[in-house]
Amino acid sequence: MNRLRPSIKPRFLISAPKPVPIVIATLLAIPVIMAAWFGVSSGGSETWDHLLNNRLLEFTTTTLGVLVLAGALMLLIAVPSAWLVSLYEFPGRRIFDWALVMPLAMPGYVMAYAWADLAGIAGPLHNTFRSLTGLSARDYWYPDLFTVPGLSFVLGATLFPYVYITARSAFLNQSLSTLEAARSLGASDFRLLRAIALPAAAPAILAGLSLGLMEAAADYGAADFLGIQTLGVGIVRAWASYNEPAAAARLALVLVSIAFTLLIAARFLQRGSTQETSRRWLTPSRQALGTSSKWLAFAFCLFVFAITFTLPVTRLIWLSVETAAGTGDIWEPLQNSLLLGTLGASLALVSAVLIVLHHQDAPQTAWLTRLASAAGYAAPGAVLGLGGLFILQVTGQSLTGLVALGILVWIYATRFTAAGIEPIAATIARTPKSLAMAGRSYDVSWLYRFRRVEFPIMRPGILAGALILFVETLKELPATLMLRPAGWDTLAIKAHNYATDERLAQAMLPSLLITLAGLLPVLLLSRQMNRTGHKIT
Amino acid sequence: MRHFSLPLAASLLLGLAACAPASQDTETSVAEPEKRLTVYSARHYDSDKLLYAAFEEQAGVTIDVRETNASQLLETMKAEGENSPADVIIASDAGALWRFEDAGLTQAFDADLITADVPASLRHSDNHWIGLAKRIRLVAYDPELVDTANIDQWTDLADEVNRGEICVRSSSNIYNLSLMAEMIDRVGEETASAWAAGVKANMARNPQGGDTDQIRAVAAGQCSIAIVNHYYWARLSQSDSEADRAVAEKTRLIIPSFDDGGGAHVNITGIALSKTSENPDLAAEFVNFLLTKQGQELLTLDTQELPILAEADAPAGAVDVPPYERSDASLDVFGENQAEAQRLYDLAGWN
Amino acid sequence: MATNLPLTADHVSKAYAGGTVVDDVSLTLLPGKLTALIGGSGAGKSTLLRLFAGFERVDSGEIRYGEQLLSSRRKLVEPKHRHTGLIFQDFALFPHLNIIQNIMFGLTAMDKQERLKTASDWVSQMQLDHRREAYPHQLSGGEQQRVAIARALAPEPRAILMDEPFSGLDPSLRTETRQMALSAVKQAHIPALLVTHDPAEALRHADQIAVMSGGKLLQSGTAEHIYFEPENETVASALGPVFKHEVSTLPAPWQSDFSGRQHIYWRPEALQPDPDGAVQARVTSVAGVGSAAVINVKLGPFECQISPQTARPAVGDQVRLALDPRAVFAF
């Protein structure tokens, strides 16, 4: 191996072929730019005026209302449960510790289906309640799922793990002695949380919240099913019902700005995490709770887990089994889902790896690929679906066969590459810089270095990234709905179609399969993040 | 593709349908010896797969299917323009089919090629689309609480006697739009408007959910009158779920008629011929197949719609649908009055 | 809160999954006295401190403040109710609070004005007036530790527990900070515990020294007592280097003093240059100057360090040596 000659000073001349990052940035940005450009450039129209005057404000306030309520719910669920499992010992703590991440495997629309069935006026909960109390449906008030608070509940219940994960890792990484100092100064547990732990964990918690809210803003399936007029629904309606793609693109601009603001906020907050002066980053030994408090903690976590996972999933299983007869045709959508998930995740993963490598090689132009991937990540699926259709128009292609498949996979990559970058970059960030420097000081080919140095270093991150990307693609609905090749039903599409057809029972099996397929990756991910205590995106 | 110029792209945007590159005229029909039929369907029923398979075998063709909801099919076809591979479009509700026609995406079937006997009132006046199955908008009610005399006319639903008893879905739904469109045609705009306001006043709750949710609400006792399509009730009665069957057992169906004795509000699932179709003959053959006894029974097997063809058996759940009469009025008004219908609902405050 | 009662550990034990960490330890911390707890790592020092503070439950035995029971197998008065000040090696300041807010954190019993005044007094006493609005990460290590001391003492705790408070500091800051801290602690007239691995620190400042090893308290007493009358080799070496010698290899004049012993131990200062000394030895190496000097002599088959002296011998010089019995131990 005579090429392995160390040069006198480190030479940074080996890098991925120069055009690669530019090509990737362009590819990732095109769908977003297309959607935005069509929104800005097309002239005013009657539909746009109508939307602007009558609906834009409503769409926007509804979306913001949902974000506020869902965000409050995420905090209310995630922070106390993360606090409990991080600092106290109580029955079931070890299980809740990872189990509370599981709702992340369930797409918002699946949660909406399950809860609509569970909590409908004729559903099992109401029926039981009425048969126990002898009341009639007109005699009592009940919380209605088909409302803004209802949608917020559904989104909060599926997305709170974003906050839970970041809060938990922040609490676990808290300096033990700082907490003990506060205790010795007479601080009650509540004051400990309010005055010490929360301020220290706040940036991480808010970063998790921003990500959760970004996902909430991108929702289409749940809002559409519950009939709530959010921007995500408005975009698809403006496109599909008002026949006005340009108006849809303009609504998309509003939604993208909201989501992008949240994404930027998340990054900013994560960067500004507290400067701890305390160096002892030990995991606090968990405090045993008194008899009544430990059962209270157990009850709280059980309640959270039940409403966000056990109840809806049990309902999915129940109805899937009950209506097992009508499930003959599930293998094809399952295969399609797996294939699309694999293709989408692979393309996104390759771009993520290339982008991370590029950041290492040429940090001064890293903003380009970073911005492109962030823009795609902040653009909800409905927006990118629109962008995909515009690409189709401009190129004069029809939505058939390989073309549609290609565009859809392209859109997946645009949407999710950023989610793949984060764990890979995190793995690299944890390895000493000198290692990469040493690797680069040798005059070897780019590929050789990647195979021998970067890839082994990045492997855990790549695995985590692949898992995230796979789950995300599997759950994706609006873009898939708009762009999938003719005759291609995925599990998500199947569930959505059944649900819009008011065949909720039949929607349960595909919904269950999506959830199950996402569960393993989510659990592996949770384990990895628990171990490294690292941030997520 | 990175090289397209902005002016070119802009012109494509303004005149999408017309601007597809000529070179894209591809081999779909030319080079393929094999017969292919592309179906854009707004339905998604497992029994449709059986239906397509049966025709594939009988006619020796291959069917490509694109299934998604009607409005997305419409936009997809607009985006595809001249390149759309669609031969036929299957969609529920005459109002939905009208949207395709209105957007210039359909062409007329050659009436001579359609051998099946479809009443003129269940097809487009120029044969842009042809009815395949019937669907009836009616009332599901709680027999213990409601006197059928109070609901056997559509206008009765606006009567004060039904105050706080009605459950119905959002007005933007095509079923309600078509109902209102026919109402306008039958009783005039003024009465129709008053009717919407009366129904709004009689609602037990704000419009929400789908038709099935309204029937469930009646069974749960939240209201006693639900305005729904018949097949949602039929599906509940045929459900594998015991709870669903219990819902159907607690409710009864009645088909209100229009005041002038003009019979029921009957809608259709229909098939339209795509303007871009290069196989109109094959498409017609497909339509004829759908209108055979076999085709009709497969078509309605899962949906619980009512066959058009007299000799076809109604699906199990639909046999409980009460007898009804229908006038010969054209379904074209469903589309023509659509915008007006939405306006009247909006005025009445019916969300 | 100046009731000034002793804090007592009475036959306290604590075990984890890995084994017994604190094994039947009894130790009384007297008010106004500084008790230094020394021992190697893993000796159980920090765990004993945490037991005193109430962060851990005892497996057996009792911890009492005066007559008040704080810990037993069944009972645990929580840290927040113990009024015990704590000082950590890593300072453990609240990163999001400034200096004055950090010090005010524990002063909840007072009204706002009083809190501010008390905290300000402490800021002045710790000579931090110019930094009162600063945040912890803006301070030097010594300044941070002074804030930590003020924060711990400001609420007038019943006792103060310090876990290697000075070992994280730069040596140049250590003396000054330690001086300021320990004088503040002594002024409080409360039981004080100082966990340290620096024997010089213990010997110089502690009123009482307790030596732990393997979870057991080997010996406790005044510095004088522990230093000169260690009960075993471990205690002896915990307080400074000791040399072990076989009696039979000693120069003949000294052998008779230890008849019946196989080994003896002495500290470097035991070998005193003395013109009247019974033994003569040759200097084999000299390094350093003054009190840091290391002078070795050839004594029989061994090279031994002797007590430093101002007159610096040269290699090869013959010196006469006496053995100071106070620094010689036999167990």
Image: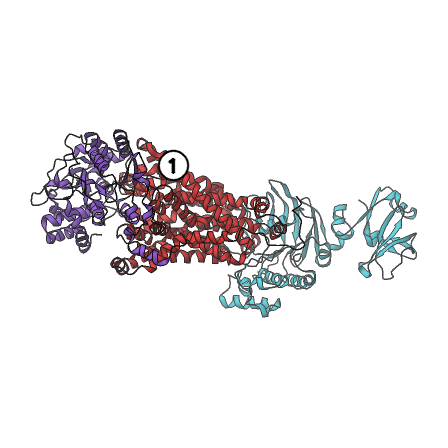
Residue B165 appears at what percent x and percent y?
A: 18, 46
Residue C81 shows up from this direction: no
Q: Which chain is cyan?
A: C
Q: Secondary structure at mark 1?
A: helix
A60 relative to C317 in the view: left or right? left
Amino acid type shown at disc 1: Leu
Q: Colour of chain A?
A: red
Report whether B46 appears left or right of A340. left
Q: How many marks?
A: 1
Q: Nearer the viewer, residue A330 or A9?
A: A9
User: In the orientation shown, which residue stands out farthest toward the left?
Assistant: B260
Looking at the picture, does residue A517 appear above or below residue C118?
above
| Quadrant position of residue A399 | top left
- On what subunit does the disc labeled 1 rest? A
Mark 1 closeness class: few <14, some 14–19, many ≥20 residues within 10 Å: many
Residue C303: horizontal and vertical position, in percent? Answer: 86, 49
Q: How is the image coloured?
A: by chain
Q: Which residue is mark 1?
A: A334
Describe residue A163's horizontal placement relative to residue C278 as left or right: left
Query: Residue A19: x, y in percent?
Result: 50, 53
Residue B185 shows in this picture: yes
Q: Is residue A155 above or below residue C98?
A: above
Relative to B89, say whether C196 is above or below: below
Q: Quadrant of residue B5?
A: bottom left
Give the colour of chain B. Answer: purple
- Is residue A302 rendered to the left or right of residue B130? right
In the image shown, does B60 or B249 lie closer to the viewer? B60
Q: Position of residue A496 (x, y in %)?
A: 32, 42
At x 45%, y 57%, the residue is: A264
Q: Please state which of residues C190 and B80 is positioned toward the viewer in this rendering.
A: B80
